[in-house]
Image (cartoon, grey):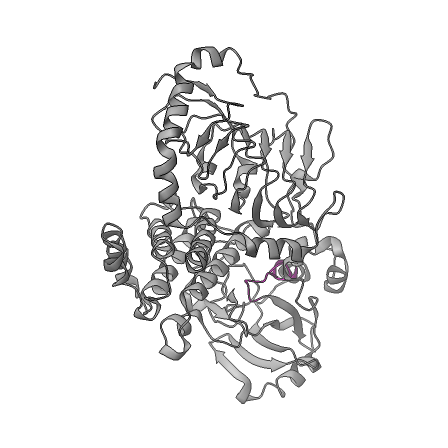
Amino acid sequence: MESLRILSLSKNNLSGQVPDLHNLTNLQVLELEDNHFGPNFPGLPYKVATLVLRNNSFHSGIPAELVTYHLLQKLDLSFNGFVGPFLPSLLSGLSMNYLDISHNKFTGMLFENMSCHAELAYVDLSSNLLTGELPPCLNLSSESKTVLYARNCLSNQEQEQHPLNFCHNEALAVKILPRDEKRHNKKVLASSTMGGVVGGIAIVGLVVLFVKRVYNKDGVKKPQRKISVENLSTVNTVKLLSDARHISQTMKLGASLPTYRTFSMEELKEATNNFDASNLLGEDSNSQMYKGKLNDGTPVAIRSSKARKKVGQRDFTHHIELISKLRHSHLISALGHCFDCCQDDSSTSRIFNIFEFASNGTLRDHVSGIPEKKLKWPQRIGAAIGVARGIQFLHTGIVPGVFPNNLKITDVLLDHELLAKLCSYNLPLLTEGSVGAADSSATKQNSGTRGRHEDKKDIYDLGVILVEIIFGRPVVKNEVMVSKDLLQVSMTVDDVARRNIVDPSIHKECSDESLKIVMEICIRCLSKEPSDRPSVDDVLWNLQFAAQVRESSRTG
């Protein structure tokens, strides 16, 4: 069977779970459409180029490893019940030219700066629960490209869309098949499924005669559309902030925030009671952080920093464009700025950056602090998802991406609703010290100098944060690998023994399956080789799946 290249069992009324096909190492075409296979996604060999699961009974998530199938050209998952996050990396697969995920229950947000494979000729995202904005690489009119996206909750209105709350409500109603039920179904269906598939392989000689080649390599290559920083030498700050062409569309992700604007010194003095010492949150040799309250009652954090000498207006304008893009629900977002100029030569002496104020302290306070403040397991997963989404935005939501960010659990702040927000990110700014959010380490180094796998440093840091979330105690640098080893050992023991190493305060509320998923992705994040660490999309998918599994086990 290892030499089998094409397996087509379409329209045969077969049912049950598809057996693991990893051993069919030369399989390139798998067509199973119009049957009743399911519920779980089949195990596949890595050489598969065409996968058609259309119109079956699959209702699991899709494995994150699917994005590593670099020979995959055609993927058709339409008319099933697939749930969980859509993997946007599929759009940029090295060989992908046909993608159809229509009529499922995929969730997730599309970003403007997602990329697509140049030869992607057909995309159908319709009838799912996707939010956000269609990336420009899918929004270009072309006779050689077909893009369908109706009946989601996208901001693009050229094709019919549901209101945003429809997708949120439907996503909350989606349930993952409980683990025990999965095992039961596997036992009942395995024998019948294996018989059906093996029978199909036995007559594969006849089937091959009817297999229709579906590769489409005639698509016209199109350059990927990217946002670049324009030449701003003649653009002043006021024009920059009033001209929508210079404001990144990613600001829509922080739509609930006040509009980014220029503040006056009078406003800042009034907000801080003339920078009274009672409002000082912290300081270092070059900057001070103050708590303040604007006239409308909005609490803010105001950072006053010394400007570098001999910095021109063009550099200041560039600085403002960069920082004005940092608006996302999981970042401590910039609300505005103020330049304090010297009276003698009008040069800028200090830069004031105004940020959101997070009132509930750091994530560490709520996982390693006093018992009364500790988060429950679903809240911890929610916080981890927030951190991952913040990292995802920094990496892919703006161009160029911002990384590495040297993240620590103390760089994750919680707002009044316990929403996790990153207050530390790496931008080349114009101050002698760091400028960012409610933390003195907000900009660690110049992001213009990067080596390979720099983005994977953030994945490692996320793994360290997950360790503390799991164990419920501070983890110092020299304990990280010991903690990883402990997690790896725990994966080989029973559920009771595994629970004994986690924070006692969450023993009773985290399901075994949910805990195991978080542990597994944590171990992968801490891989020694950066190339072995998962992508941020992979991490996010697993964390969201862990949250859904936990909810399913609680209600099931």
Which quadrant is home to the C terminus?
bottom left
Residue 531 on image: x %, y %: 38, 42
Q: Residue at x 63, y 53 (%)?
A: 167
Seen in the image, is 324 located left or right of residue 44? Answer: right
Residue 248 in sight here:
no
Name the quadrant containing residue 299: bottom right
Above or below, comparing residue 297 to residue 165 in the picture: below
Q: Residue at x 58, y 42 (%)?
A: 104
Q: Residue at x 57, y 20 (%)?
A: 214
Above or below, comparing residue 74 to residue 39 in the picture: above
In this view, the residue in front, 306 or 241, is: 241
Q: What is the magenta segment's predominant secondary structure? A: loop
Seen in the image, is 52 located left or right of residue 542? Answer: right
Residue 42 on image: x %, y %: 42, 34
Residue 145 on image: x %, y %: 68, 30
Q: Is residue 545 magenta?
A: no
In this view, the residue in front, 23 or 368, is: 23
Q: Which residues are magenta?
A: 320-332
Which quadrant is home to the N terminus?
top left
Q: Is residue 327 magenta?
A: yes
